[in-house]
Amino acid sequence: MKNLRKPYRKRGRFFNCKNDKVQGFFYKSAKMLLQSVSLFWSNPQKGQELWIGKACPLSCSVAPVITWIGHASFLIQVGGINILVDPIFGDVTFLYKRILPPGIALEQMPKIDYVLISHNHIDHMDGPTLRAIKGKNKDVVFLVPQGDKAWFDKRGFENCHEHMWWDQRSFCPPGEPKNQVTFSFLPASHWSQRGMFDKNRSLWGSWMIDCSGSRIYFAGDTYFDSHFSEIAQEFPNIDVALLPVGPCEPHKVLKDWHLDAQEAGKAFLQLGAKYFVPMHWGAFAFGVEHFDKPIEMIKAWWEKNTDLLTEKKLRCMKVGQSVAFSNNDATLKQE
């Protein structure tokens, strides 16, 4: 891994590369806030009921079962362990209200063993949700990017580990030597910030989960970049890729922050995964399109590129829906 991409550091801040630019950030953010909030309040987001499933999570599973909670939040169950990624169960702020409700209520959640965080934006590292998870699961382990452990330490999270790109950490559940799980923190092209003055003080990234012969990739937030092909080289035979498909518009503003649906399709092809599960759409009005526009766009891209997608499958999940994945097919557990 000596020649693989590493984050660039300067004066205590992380950057995607040496020439990474952060200029115009506040202008872009203010513009997007005004546009998206205006759209949300002036154009009601109709049709939500079509994307709400019947949540009934399993207590655990050996074969991989993935439940979409909403946005970038998933419950991943594999090898007898339960993993949450980027959990958020409430609103982002009083301006960014939820469009689709969380697919599982906190009180319905099974015991959680691990929580993975991709970066510290509040729609991915939500304080109230994390404190609630810690309160219900005394032995839960939190895996976070480099620079974020201090936030957890300050709030009394006792079992927290931080990581640089390409770091790996393995755990073996007591009495279950065959169910070892390995988490690999991998690159993404994005940025971090929680307060006014901490931009890029912590890292951002994606996660690979290897357990019981299954390999699941969680992309976090990212724009389209070379890291997808690098990850594919180091981690062949990815079973499931959880990839963001929105917000999509205005693309000129968002292209340096997020994948749109077509770019997510290109990333999926570079990763070489078997299953594509779209995420980061529907829960919040972060773009200026209707809430389900990203999912319609990825469906259209899939139909247009079927010749490139032989033996690959798209799984568009409802919030609260569980999908059981196997080597042969994926079975919808909740309609």
Image (spheres, helix red, strand yellow):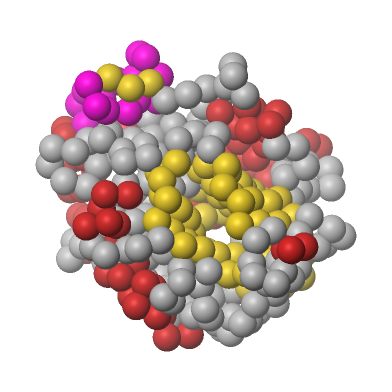
Residue lying furthest right in this view?
328
Residue 261 in view here = no
Looking at the image, residue 260 lies above or below residue 291: above
Instruction: Work out whether residue 205 or residue 54 is closer to the camera in this orientation and state it.
Output: 205
Looking at the image, residue 193 lies above or below residue 12: below
When asked about the image quadrant of residue 55, the answer is: bottom right
Residue 176 in view here = yes
Q: Does the magenta stretch include residue 63?
A: no
Residue lying furthest top in this view?
19
Q: Total marks drawn?
A: 0
Looking at the image, residue 123 lies above or below residue 297: below
What residue is at 38 percent from the left and 30 percent from the top?
A: 256
What residue is at 44 percent from the left and 32 percent from the top?
A: 189
Q: Quadrant of the C terminus?
A: bottom right
Q: Main secondary structure of the magenta part?
A: loop
Looking at the image, residue 168 lies above or below residue 314: above
State the image coordinates of residue 98 (x, y, percent, origin top left): 32, 68
State the image coordinates of residue 100 (x, y, percent, origin top left): 41, 70
Left or right of 173, for residue 200: left
Instruction: Work out whether residue 145 or residue 20 is closer to the camera in this orientation and state it.
Output: 145
When asked about the image quadrant of residue 107, the answer is: bottom left
Instruction: Work out whether residue 291 or residue 202 is closer to the camera in this orientation and state it.
Output: 202
Left or right of 106, for residue 169: right
State the image coordinates of residue 114 (x, y, percent, origin top left): 51, 63
Q: Quadrant of the N terminus?
A: top right
What residue is at 77 percent from the left and 62 percent from the top?
A: 178
What residue is at 16 percent from the left and 33 percent from the top?
A: 27
Left or right of 183, for residue 314: right
The residue range painted magenta reads 11-25
State the image coordinates of residue 243 (x, y, percent, origin top left): 56, 48
